[in-house]
Amino acid sequence: MPFLAILFFLSQDFNQRGFVQTQTTVYPQDAVNDGGNVIGETQIRYEGFFIPWAGFQLSGALDLRSDTHHQTDRTWRLDWKDRERQRALLSLRRFSAQYNHSGLTIEAGKQFVRWGRTDIVNPTDRFAPRDFMTVVDNEFLGIDAVRGTYERGTHTLDVVWAPRLTPSRTPLLHQRWFIPPPITAPLTVARKIPEGSQYGIRWSHTGEVEFAAAFYSGFNHLPSYQVDSSGTVVEETYADQRMIGGDVGVPLQLLSVKGEAAWFQSPDQKTDDYVLYVVQLERQAGEWFFVGGYGGQHVTAKGTQSADFNPDRGMTRTILARAGYTIDVNRSIAFETAIRENFDGFWSKIEFSQAFGQHWRLTSGFTAIRGKPSDFLGQYRRNSHATVTARYSF
Amino acid sequence: MSRTIPAVFFALLILSTQAVAQDPRTIVEETQKRSSAKSQAYEGTLRVVKEGSKIAEKRWSFERIGSHGDSKSILRFSAPAEVKGVALLVVNHPDRSSDQWMWAPAIGRERRIALQDRSQRFFGTDFSFEDLEERDTDQYEYRLLGEETFEGAACWKIESRPRQNKVSQYTHSHVWVRKDNYVVVQIENYKNATLVRRAKYGDIQRVQSIWTAHTIEMYDITEKSRTILTIEKLQYDLPMKDEDFTLQAFRRER
């Protein structure tokens, strides 16, 4: 019988991939709350895809990671929820079952849901919390959800229900990417993650012009802060949020135009109601790839919050640009920048990457951040840094 | 009389065949007809060679439903490890340029390859995105340039120019078609008077009654770089479903 089971599994469609990565980050400047200038990180990611029979697929991914700066919890446990402040030593990045028949796909479990069309800032991407521990180098977190997608011709309907909120991971309190308020008393942060489900629906159309409309009801995965009367206790909350938005992509003769906009409303009035929009132009020319755009916002009603941590809004009233150049099949250079329209904040990143053989890639980069302390980007002006990353992919 | 009729008939038949064969459109249509299949699947290995030394190797699996202007294909990279899972969906149309989308697992979203970006090199290889779409006879005008011997085989040399509804980086192409089996053995792609890419089709074998090249060497004249695609495990007319060639199916990581 075990022999038959082995034969069964061997005969099925199983694919795997992953990487082992080490990264060194050097911060030339000291931060007021963090004396560390060098951080070493190691990460192992393993992903597997198993198709036991046609139309049914199991997907799983694990992350094992550690670092020298206590950004990662050092206790051995498997984290499913991704709700802790620190990264988990061992976390389940994805674990889902997917069934598809005809134009219908249903996926249940921990998964990634990406909405929207533009780059850098995505107002309609509501089911995509991120790890913002290093604010400008972030990555997506999986969410627990059931997702149904139905595609017919050029139309696709996407319905998502998430039983609970997975909040974005914010910078740690005593580390350089958390900018402490100007008070001398010790600060206590009381975190309140809401219980309750979220849902959303998106209809999209593909054709000469591609467009989509989306609605979301749930919570903001980015926190708001309310300071109590003593000024030392900060309540961290995740506001109720509704979103109505859409995106469009128009290919023109010389370039592609993409736009995305959304109106956010907070029923509990803990955060502002606002409109967020992005317009970007794209063009490839030879080995060059260019993206340039503008992100803007308009507040329609003020909320009761003392402060927000909202990189999406922090990147508005901003000119955004990205360029890439493929030197050859193994080497490339990438450049990204964001400049506030009033020049109060500036972020720029340049990266050189080279592959060696079939498995190795070395990437080195430098990120410069400048600006005024009152600006979202400018507040991180002491966090310019250089990185060297070595990755072995398998 | 009874002997004359067949003789005249055969003479006319030979003459008409010659006349038809001299019409470049008919030659290309015959090429297309002979290479048509309900579906196609293969595993490909790409070797990028620059200045005589191999600098990269990539592998992909390819599946196509339909043929020529009425087909859809998905190409999924399986190596090197860092691009495993990256995929390209090409939806070919009989009356206009194809639609193409790229899927990158790292960003979890598909990206449409705009028409004006099709001249871009495909993943650093010497193939451009446009080179990966299928040519349909009706999207080009043809002119017979003459007859030439190509690697020992008698060929027709045909010029093809894209019609107005076909957006192309190339102003025209020269196509060599073997006379004995109507297989395309070389395509030279031009931008105005400048030759920019040359594709050579080799190791031609008969698979399920379709003569098929098992190596395609794409030479980028400007970059002085070549990419050799070697085709393995080629099969035609496998059972495939249309629903496996949609954007939704394309997003399913494997």
Image (cartoon, coloured by chain):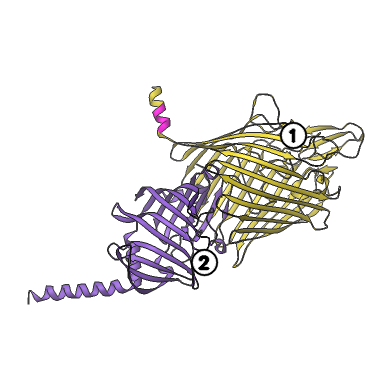
Chain colours: A yellow, B purple
Please tell me in which quadrant of the rendered image residue B156 appears.
bottom left
Host chain of mark 2: B
Magenta stretch, residue numbers = A6-10
Foreground pick, A24 / A114 = A24
Viewer-side residue, A100 vs B44: B44
Residue A289 marker: none
Q: CA distance from mark 1 to mark 2?
A: 54 Å
- Please, what secondary structure does the residue beneath circle 1 have? loop
Mark 1, residue position? A193
Q: Position of residue A157 (x, y in %)?
A: 57, 50
Question: Residue A389: which quarter of the image?
Answer: top right
Q: Nearer the viewer, mark 1 or mark 2?
A: 2
Query: Quick one: A366 or A344, which is closer to the camera?
Result: A366
The local crowd at label 2, few if under 14, some if 14 to 19, many if 20 or more residues have their Cα within 10 Å, is some
Q: Is residue B191 above or below residue A147?
A: below
Task: Identify the residue under disc 2.
Answer: B169
**On what subunit does the disc labeled 1 rest?**
A
Residue B215 position, x and y percent, is 39, 54
**Looking at the rendering, which quadrant does residue A23 occupy?**
top right
Regarding mark 2 in the picture, which secondary structure is present there?
loop
Amino acid carrying mark 1 in the image: Ile
Using the rendered image of the protein, determine whether residue A248 is visible from the camera's viewpoint: yes
Please tell me whether residue B103 is drawn above or below residue A55 in the rendered image.
Answer: below
Q: Nearer the viewer, residue A89 or A166?
A: A89
In the image, residue B166 lies at what x, y percent?
48, 68
